[in-house]
Amino acid sequence: MRNVIVGAVAGAAGTMVLDMASYGDMAVRGRQSSNLPAEVIRRVAERAGVEPLGKPDDQVDDATKNRRSALGALSGYGVGLTVGALYGIVRPAMRGVPMLFAAVVLGGLVMAASDVPAAKLEATDPTTWSTDSWISDIVPHALYGLTTAFVFDVLTRER
């Protein structure tokens, strides 16, 4: 159980670094935040018949749009902590695996956990993304993986 908790803590650290990288990119390039997480929430709510969250933007008020945005952000935290907790379960059995390799896998997993459902829900089409869009997605997820793997290994290192 300890490794699950430490993994979740490491995942929280990774999620914080992912957010910092994303907000840093927004600040440097002057780009707006992505509405993709909110759109994923809208599409899930639409399929589940949850009103008014599932209605299109032009049919809802700002409060509903804000709720979708908040739920999208919270789902990202959920993914980050869950992947970290799962890492806490499997990492002890993979001590021979270099941390850098584990970090790349972690970054890829958390990226897939966000992007695959969005693509399946047709909220986005990664085949149409520009190089800048891919970089804006890959770099923060890679930093998540590096941070999560590093924090977990540091907190579980025997003294």
Image (cartoon, grey):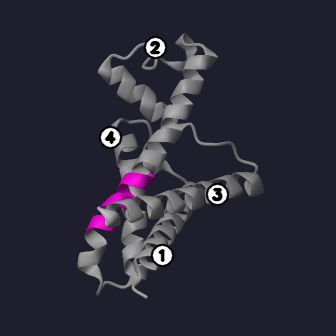
Q: Amino acid at mark 4?
A: Lys
Front: mark 2 or 1: 1
Q: Can you tell which mark lies on residue 120?
A: 4
Mark 3 or 4: in front is 3
Q: Residue at x 41, y 72 (%)?
A: 104
What is the secondary structure assignment of the residue under circle 4?
helix
For disc 3, the marked residue is 20
Q: Position of residue 151 (x, y in %)?
A: 49, 72
Residue indicated by mark 2? 52
Q: In x, y percent, where is residue 73?
A: 53, 40
- Could you tell which of marks 4 and 1 lies nearer the N-terminus? 4
Mark toward the start of the polypeptide (3 vs 4)? 3
Residue 112 numbered mark, or none: none
Given residues 158 and 34, the one toward you in this image is 158
The range drawn in magenta is 80-89
Question: Alpha-carbon neighbours of circle 3 within 10 Å: few (<14), some, or many (≥20)?
Answer: some
Real-space Cα separation, disc 4 to disc 1, in angstroms? 31 Å
**Residue receiving disc 1:** 150
